[in-house]
Amino acid sequence: MGDVAIRTSGLGKSYELGLSRRGYGTLRESVVETAKGSLGRLAGRRGERAAGDTLWALRDLSLTVERGEVVGLIGHNGAGKSTLLKVLSRIVEPTEGWADVTGRTGSLLEVGTGFHPELTGRENIFLNGAILGMRRSEIRRRFDEIVAFAEIERFLDTPVKRYSSGMSVRLAFAVAAHLEPEILLVDEVLAVGDAAFQRKSLGKMSEVAEAGRTVVFVSHNLAILQALCERGVLLERGEAVTDAPVGEAIDSYLRTLERAAGGDLLERTDRDSRGYDESLVRRVEIRDREGGLADTVVAGRSATIVVEVTEALPMMECRLAIHNSLGHPVATLDSEVSAPGDVRDPELGPRIECEVDALPLLPGRYRIDVLLKGKRQIQDGLQAAAFFDVEPGVLAARPTPISGADGDVVLPHRWRLP
Amino acid sequence: MSTKTAVEPVATNAAAEAPVPETIRLEPTSGFGRVLSPHELWRYRDLAFQIAARDVTVRYRQTALGAAWAILQPIGFMIVFSLFFGRVAGVSSDGLPYALFSLAALVPWTYFANVLLLGSESLVANSSLVAKIYFPRIFMPAGVLAAGLLDLGISLVILFAIVLIYGLVPSVAVLMLPVLVLIMLAAALGVTAGLSAVNVRYRDVRYVIPFAIQMWLFATPVAYPSSLIGEPWRTLSAINPMVGVVEGFRWATLGTADAPWELIGVSAVAALVFLLAGLTYFDRVERSFADHI
């Protein structure tokens, strides 16, 4: 039939690790490292990332995407989702295997790539459009639509450096949204702009999907994936482990998250790539302060989230993000936003504690993402570092609704009824 | 990023609603034959144009003097050279007014030096594009060359104005200018493509370039005439492509009697070698730019 948009076979991409974290070095560095590496090998030293170590970001991936399918890629950090998009959009070349891509491809790996602050909105529309692969004539044809979508009519001839950040994001997305490729590769770009604009963008995305275009979509937001995609592919360590209807793929992703949280966190490799790794998250646990099982909390009772780390660093800060079972963010607890009740206790040892009074969550399963900072640097980050269950309880003298309630939080409240 | 375009060709009437889709096979490639795929270069022509236009617009918008820089730089050098080499050191200028003699050489030289400086940084300076978007990477250094042509054009006009003020009339040799410019472009593209590619891997390039440009200036008969060098060294020195270009520019714009054919010939061949070597290296490493940038 030939109605295949993307077909890959045994696709793999490896990176050489070693040298500096940043991926480039100076001549001196590479000479020194090569010498060190071979000395180390002579001395039989192993374990440390020596120059020449390979990391397979993508391995033996065989995948067929029919024309008109909307496929979501799911997986941890470093599972290979972005690498796959980069290979498919020709930014990096595969190390092995092949991929056949049929049709004009547009990739949206970042909003506003190539925006230049000195150029006006009008000039940037043409530049960015060309960067995204649009013909000049095509941009001209859709110019008014783009401007209207971005809501920047009045600032068309103002340099983008004078735009508010919201405006430039809107403009960037507007250009991207009017791209008309047969295959659209999108990486987590909906997480921009204000809520109203996000809704608009989401609407545009589903329009694109419904128009019969092929879309490959990466997002951590499972609710958006569920809404947009029919099919989900779960990647783990560069391999496709599940390829199923999106609901099933999300379920199996959530199961892998739980399995990962169950084990020793130090063994996990899907850590935040920005981390300096001087201190790592060893364990995350939530405890009901009034007793009970670990990782089970009763709604309305006070709880403590304990983050055990490998080392206590100066200026340590911690950010916890609580997500519901669909991966939707529910709350963020950030020690950098300090309050009078916060305490720095040198006696505490390599651990951070966060106390929540009267936990205002509805019964259900939640996960905690951790971002650890120290010495004013990001040290480590882990998604789904722990899971916990909230049991029905009593908040502000009112029982939490057991089922049928919308949302994730309970607000302490009082009624006045006639 | 290989581009074995298989089966169906692209429909030329792309404006139609359903052009015949084209299948692109992505697979590991080795060896050469990527940068120079005319099909790819043509397909991304709009992007090439937009990038060159951006470079020109941004530079003219950010600088107070804008287009004036195109000519201030060579004129500044001309004044300094005239004072020190012409007056103080008494360097020969083949019987021409020293100011003109040096300016005719400084016009191409300034273009070449600026292109080298900006072009070798072009991939690194646009790292966000290289890491997030596919396009033939050669557009980055080539775009710098293209954007610089505007400056070259402006400074050529000024050069001719000054030549006329001095009462000289260019001969038909002026028709050779496009050929000389082509030789210079070939050499410049080869060198900048090669250096910009090395720069992605080893940022040392950034520190080497300004120094190398100074050395190259002294190795090129800009401040002195190549007639100071005895044969056969004079002809041999033209393996530096800028020797033929610079002496050719003097001959073509100032109407000096003897055409330096042997210099131009040697330099043309050398420029071609530079071009091939630079593009070959670029081609070899292009596929790994996104991994290293």
Image (cartoon, rainbow, N blue to C red):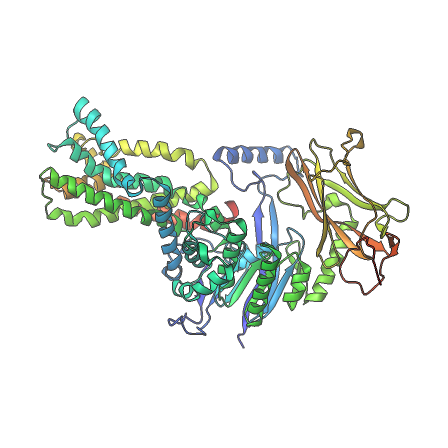
Residue at screen point 81% across, 57% down: A362
Task: Identify the residue at the far top of this view.
Answer: B88
Where on the picture, by quarter, is residue A207?
bottom right
Can I make out residue A178 in this image? yes
Q: Is residue B65 above or below residue A221?
A: above
Which residue appears farthest toward the front when viewing the image? A418
**Image location of residue A3, percent across then percent down:** 54, 74
Q: Residue at x 26, y 39 (%)?
A: B109
Task: Please tell me which residue is depicted at 80% across the width and 63% down the height of the picture.
Answer: A405
Looking at the image, residue B243 lies above or below residue A69: above
Q: Tell me: A97 left or right of B230.
A: right
Q: From where the camera sits, is residue B264 visible? A: no
Outermost bottom residue: A1
Q: Tell whether B71 sits left or right of A191.
A: left
Image coordinates of residue A246 in percent, x first then y, are 68, 66
Q: Going by the image, does A348 lie left or right of A165?
A: right
Compared with residue A10, is residue A273 higher up or lower down, i.e. above or below?
Answer: above
| Tally of marks | 0
The location of residue B95, given as percent across then percent down, is 10, 32
Between residues B94 and A395, which one lies in front from this camera angle?
A395
Dividing the picture into quadrants, the one containing residue A144 is bottom left
Q: In the rendering, at what x and y percent does residue B120 appear? A: 39, 42
